C-alpha cells in the first residue's frame, strides 16, 4: 500500500511540474482573428517565444501564450 501511495505522489508531482513548462499559444492572423496553435512545452516554447513560430519554410509569426 505504501508503494502505491508513493507512486501516486510521484506521478502527481511530475504532472504539476510539466504543467509549469507548457502554455496554450496562438498568433494573430492578418484579419485580426486568433489562430490557436495548441500547447507548446519546454524548449519548443522557449524558442517560439524568442524567435517566433514557424509556419512552413518561409513564414514565421509572433506568438502569444498563456500560463496554465
Image: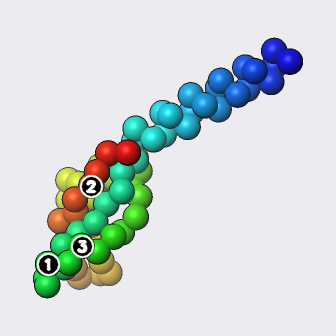
**Can you tell which quarter of the image residue 49 is in?**
bottom left
Q: Which residue is mark 2?
A: 65
Mark 2 vs mark 3, foreground winner is 3
Measured from the top left, where is residue 42 in percent x and y? Answer: 40, 46
Kindly identify which residue carries mark 3: 34
Q: Nearer the viewer, residue 20 or 49?
A: 20
Image: 22 above or below 51: above
Q: CA distance from mark 2 to mark 3?
A: 12 Å
Q: Residue 57: which numbered mark, if any?
A: none
Residue 55 visible in the snapshot: yes
Find residue 44 and report its horizontal and vertical position in percent: 37, 55
**Viewer-proximal residue, 68 or 21?**
68
Instruction: For label 3, count other residues whose C-alpha is less than 10 Å away and answer few (under 14), some (14-19) or many (20+).
Output: few
Can you see residue 60? no
Secondary structure beneath label 1: loop
Marks 3 and 1 in Cβ contact (< 8 Å): no
Q: Circle 2 — which element?
A: strand
Label 2 crowd bin: few (<14), some (14–19), many (20+), radius 10 Å: some
Quadrant location of the C terminus?
top left
Residue lying at 17% horizontally and 65% vertically, measured from the top left: 62
Task: Name the residue at 64% across, 26% down.
Answer: 10
As rendered, which of 8 and 46 lies closer to the eye?
8
Would you call the spot at circle 1 few (<14 residues within 10 Å), some (14-19), or many (20 or more)? Answer: few
Q: Which quadrant, please, contains the N terminus?
A: top right
Considering only order in the chain, which callout, 3 or 2, is on the residue closer to the N terminus?
Answer: 3
Q: Nearer the viewer, residue 45 or 8?
A: 8
Q: CA distance from mark 3 to mark 1?
A: 7 Å
**Going 28% across and 51% down the picture, which residue do you hit?**
66
Q: Residue beneath label 1, please?
A: 32
Amino acid at each position: 500500500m505504501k508503494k502505491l501511495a508513493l507512486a501516486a505522489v510521484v506521478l502527481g508531482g511530475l504532472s504539476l511540474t510539466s504543467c509549469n513548462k507548457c502554455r496554450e499559444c496562438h498568433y494573430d492572423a492578418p484579419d485580426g482573428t486568433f489562430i490557436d496553435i495548441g500547447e507548446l512545452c519546454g524548449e519548443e516554447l522557449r524558442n517560439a517565444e524568442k524567435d517566433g513560430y514557424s509556419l512552413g519554410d518561409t513564414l514565421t509569426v509572433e506568438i502569444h501564450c498563456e500560463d496554465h
